[in-house]
Amino acid sequence: MTDTDGKARGQGREGERRGKPLTYTSYLKINELLDLQQPLSEGPEHDEMLFIVIHQVYELWFKQINHEVDFACQLLEEDEAEDSLATLKRILTILKIMVAQVDVLETMTPVSFSSFRSRLESASGFQSAQFREFEFRLGWKRSAMVEHHPADSPGGKRLRALVDRPTIFDSFLRFLAGRDYPVPKELLERDVSQPLVESTELQELLVRLYREDHLSSTICERLVDLDEGLQEWRYRHVKMVERTIGAKPGTGGSEGVAYLRRTLFQPLFPDLWAIRSRL
């Protein structure tokens, strides 16, 4: 988008509200937001509202966390180390809120969920494009996940674009290279559409960083925190689903708990975990 396009869009918004003072409700579009919770069950069932609100809030957090990861990548590549640490801290704080939201969802009993579950038909959290975008930004790219989203859908377009974009760890490697550290050339030029694999040469460099470069090693630790934070959210999500539906298949025909369990303990940044015993 050009600057002209952005100005025109801004002027259009200004024109729409000309003569009307900007208010909390109009700025945040509260009326439109509150109209988005539309239960499908008869009655409707009381807990369907909670189910909808929680998942809509998750999608808003996914939007924000993807926004922050992109910013963290930009800061790393611009050698803005301190600012990148602040952004990583914000990402970690959002993850903690996402984990805490599971506590709220777990106040819904299996019986209350069953009262409206059939209304979900093929709808499933497995279909969240924004969560897949988060995984892709962190390096867990799987082509099979892209195929679950139509190529002409907004989420499908974003996912396909992310396949060939560097991950946050790639940005970290460029940060190190920009500081004249001997990052292996094959890692800097790797096929970013593929998952990260361990590198003995990189691990040697990382051990050195932990011993000699406090700032760079602190970034490493924040990335480990990020890896661990996502695993914590996955674990809580698995246990929440298990206590709510047990071994039943997920909505939309997914495997449910069996699939979710396989996502646990998959390190995003394997080299940062591999060096633990050497520090």
Image (cartoon, rainbow, N blue to C red):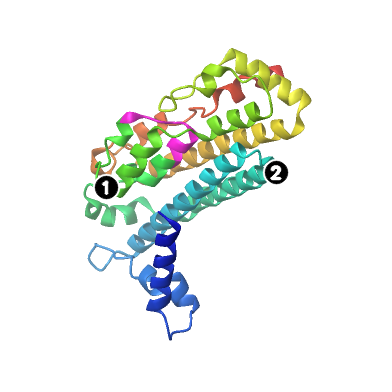
Q: Is residue 138 magenta?
A: yes
Q: Quadrant of the N terminus?
A: bottom left
Q: Name the outermost residue toward the bottom.
A: 19
Q: Is residue 128 left or right of residue 152?
A: right
The answer to which of 39 and 91 lies nearer the viewer is 91
Q: Residue at x 60, y 35 (%)?
A: 223
User: Residue 273, relative to residue 156: is it above or below?
Assistant: above
At which x and y percent is residue 202?
61, 18
Determine which quarter of the picture holds residue 175.
top right
Q: Which residue is mark 2?
A: 82
| Identity of the residue furthest to the front in this view | 4
Q: Is residue 108 visible?
A: no
Magenta span has 52? Answer: no
Amino acid at circle 1 = Ser
- Residue designated by label 1: 153
Residue furthest toward the top? 200
- Stretch in magenta: 134-143
